[in-house]
Image: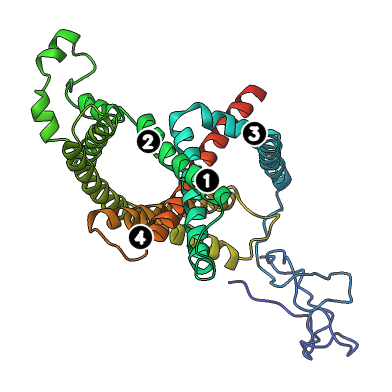
């Protein structure tokens, strides 16, 4: 290291006794002057803690901190994505407003399932009204022994209408066993790859009895339930005897009872999976909110999580409606299986009417979504 040479005299003074401009023993903090005679000039300081009043003054926090030059980066416009999403949501909302209830009901009535729901609503609304009428009439009969003829006529007609709608619904549900049968038959031929020819695929077809035995239990229950229900309906039409029809109807009730129990178990599993997914998405959204993410600074992943959370909540809502409908079916069929007598007419009327409302709401939403997709596809 080279030494620092001072002028003649006191290191802190020049020939005339004045303080040297190169060395200041009092460590004045107003400025920091470097020795120009040094053979190793120091690095140019970037900043100084104390601002100097001399010609050499610096700003910032550290002297030898290497501050990179600012680079202008192209920032994505956060409103661009918002505008795109808003446009999509606006388009969906406008298309949804264009759908009228009459159009949805028209599409529901065209299908046999939709007509069954409408007739079921009318049937159990009549039964519920008849029960209330009977309960109020029983109190009036304490004061008056007979009912007017017009009242008796209306009650008889409504009772006939309810019975006719019940038979009509059973006729509309004939041959429902074709749906589970096609599901079982689809598993009969299982080609090992797409390159297998049709002749080889026929050779590897399983026997129908083997496929039937290895079919999923819910599908088998649905198949037996539909066949037994058809036999009971044909018995009411006079094709089979009354005792045969009663046995077939009892078998159909037991299959309905077991199918409802299986549906409740599956519904509970689906709700559990949906709840775990909701917890996961809500956790990610909570983490993002704790990081100070605002409405304008939301990233794409945060918006996707919000949409996913809304979808999961809607799915959970319909799962709850399905569970309520299954509970109503379970109450209804339990009265027939276990021969319960306590408040039978009232409970069955309420359970049937509630199940009709819930199932009609699900079917209505399904047909509305179909119309909405058709409108969006035609608009695009």
Q: Rounded to the nearest whole Å, what is the CA distance between mark 2 and mark 4?
A: 20 Å
Per the image, label 4 sits on a secondary structure element best described as helix
Which is nearer the N-term, disc 2 or disc 3?
3
Between residue 190 and residue 9, name the one nearer to us.
190
Q: Residues within 10 Å of mark 3 (few under 14, many from 20)?
A: few
Which is nearer the N-term, disc 4 or disc 3?
3
The label shown at residue 153 is 1
- Residue 316 is situated, as x and y percent measured from the top left of the image, at 46, 54
The label shown at residue 167 is 2
Instruction: Locate the C terminus and report the quarter of the image it occupies.
Output: top right
- Residue 189 is situated, as x and y percent measured from the top left of the image, at 17, 21
Q: Which residue is at the far front? A: 145
Is 53 on the left-hand or right-hand side of 258?
Answer: right
Per the image, label 3 sits on a secondary structure element best described as helix
- Residue 167 is situated, as x and y percent measured from the top left of the image, at 37, 35
Residue hosting label 3: 102
- Residue 164 is situated, as x and y percent measured from the top left of the image, at 42, 36
Which is nearer the N-term, disc 1 or disc 3?
3
Of labels 1 and 4, the one closer to you? 1
Is 87 on the left-hand or right-hand side of 215?
Answer: right
């Amino acid at each position: 290291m080279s030494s620092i040479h001072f002028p003649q005299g006191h290191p802190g003074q020049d020939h005339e006794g004045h303080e040297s401009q190169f060395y200041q023993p009092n460590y004045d903090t107003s400025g920091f002057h470097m020795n120009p005679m040094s053979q190793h000039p120091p690095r140019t300081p970037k900043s100084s803690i104390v601002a100097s009043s001399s010609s050499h003054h610096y700003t910032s926090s550290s002297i030898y901190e290497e501050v990179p030059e600012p680079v202008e980066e192209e920032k994505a416009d956060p409103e661009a994505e918002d505008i795109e999403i808003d446009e999509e949501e606006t388009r969906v909302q406008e298309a949804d407003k264009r759908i009228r209830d009459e159009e949805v009901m028209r599409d529901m009535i065209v299908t046999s399932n939709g007509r069954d729901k409408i007739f079921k609503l009318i049937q159990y609304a009549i039964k519920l009204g008849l029960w209330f009428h009977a309960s109020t009439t029983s109190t009036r009969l304490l004061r008056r022994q007979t009912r007017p003829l017009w009242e008796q006529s209306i009650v008889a007609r409504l009772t006939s209408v309810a019975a006719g709608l019940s038979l009509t619904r059973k006729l509309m549900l004939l041959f429902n066993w074709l749906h589970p049968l096609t599901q079982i038959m689809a598993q009969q031929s299982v080609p090992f790859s797409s390159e297998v020819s049709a002749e080889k695929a026929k050779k590897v077809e399983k026997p129908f009895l083997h496929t039937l035995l290895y079919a999923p239990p819910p599908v088998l229950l649905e198949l037996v339930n539909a066949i037994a229900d058809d036999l009971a309906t044909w018995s009411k039409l006079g094709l089979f005897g009354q005792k045969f029809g009663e046995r077939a109807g009892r078998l159909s009730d037991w299959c309905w009872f077991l199918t409802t129990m299986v549906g409740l178990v599956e519904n509970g599993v689906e709700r559990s999976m949906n709840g775990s997914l909701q917890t996961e998405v809500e956790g990610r959204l909570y983490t993002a909110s704790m990081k100070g993410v605002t409405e304008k600074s939301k990233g794409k992943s945060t918006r996707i999580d919000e949409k996913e959370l809304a979808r999961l909540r809607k799915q959970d809502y319909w799962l709850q409606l399905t569970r309520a409908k299954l509970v109503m079916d379970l109450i209804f069929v339990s009265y027939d299986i276990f021969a319960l007598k306590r408040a039978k007419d009232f409970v069955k009327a309420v359970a049937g009417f509630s199940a009709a409302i819930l199932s009609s709401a699900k079917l209505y939403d399904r047909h509305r979504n179909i119309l909405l997709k058709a409108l969006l596809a035609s608009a695009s």
